[in-house]
Image (cartoon, rainbow, N blue to C red):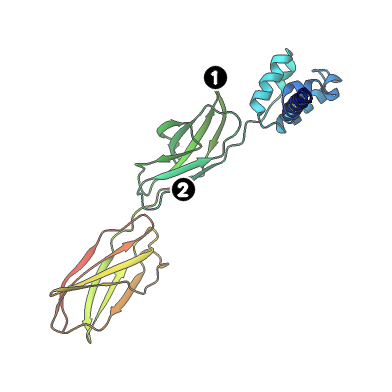
Amino acid sequence: MRLLMIILALFLIINSCLSFNNKIPNFQSYRKSKHLKNLSPNDPAFENLVKKLYDNNPNAIEFMSQVKSKFDNHVFDSITIPNPSLTITAAAVSGDLGAVQLSWTKSGKVFSYEVTTLSYPSEEVIGSLSTLLSTTYIGNLTPGLTYRFQVELVQVDGSISSTGYSDPLTIPSLPGPLTGFTADSMNNSIMLSWFAPANGVTSYHIRLSGFGFFMDVTPNVSLAASPGSLLTTTIPGLTTGIFYSITAYAQNAVGQGPAVSTGTLVLS
């Protein structure tokens, strides 16, 4: 009885392995199929079948090498097999000036990736790196300039199986200073005005400093105003006879722009 159980267990293990292997697309299984047996390598239908098998095979590059090793025929010289698709995503790193995070989808059996940074539109090579991962960080880029990124899939033998490019990406810059920043006192209030800077302002910050105190204010002004647009805000409830020093700056997703000051203002 014990021997019978062992034989049954071995049978189940072998059957499981055979079933698993049958689920893996490979050249040997296709070669034995009636579809491939009945075709000649010189038959156009053979080429179409090879392409179809290639498209349905997750290990396409390995599959084609197996096919070519079994059939020594010039017909394969004329078969154009598409390279693995390669879609590259490039995004600026929030809070990290001049940095970009690249990512792409792995395709086939790849030994490594060669990543090249190009200026745009001149396509001048700025730098390159190799990585084993399908994502990488690139820093020290110049804010305000536009780049695009090339990724090459490198096979074990050193050949390039596919090349892809990201869309052009302009590196975000810090907001500029608040030009024309002025302050006028009126009825226990201070009215401030300035021209909106460029580079996607997300907030403005104003600090009033007096004798032994300070106050931070976030003005209620349009953040969507075009660069150069005049913006104004009023800070009420202040005390007359006090010397106020006022500084302000703009901020965006990259960071804080340079601060400007109106100097000292006496509220009368």
Amino acid tagged 2 = Ala
Distance from the alpha carbon under mark 2 to that under mark 1: 31 Å
Where is 174 relative to 215, above or below?
Answer: above
Q: Residue at 44%, 44% (x, y): give it.
A: 101
User: Mark 2 or mark 1: which comes first in sequence?
Assistant: 2
Secondary structure state at the residue bearing disc 1:
loop
**Residue 163 versus residue 27: which sits nearer the camera?**
27
Res 160 → quadrant: top right
Nearer the observer, disc 2 or disc 1?
1
Which circle marks residue 157 in the picture? 1
Which circle marks residue 91 in the picture? 2
Secondary structure state at the residue bearing disc 2:
strand
**Which quadrant, please, contains the C terminus?**
bottom left
Q: Residues within 10 Å of mark 1 (few under 14, many from 20)?
A: few
Rendering coords of residue 200 (x, y %): 40, 60
**Residue 158 versus residue 8: which sits nearer the camera?**
8
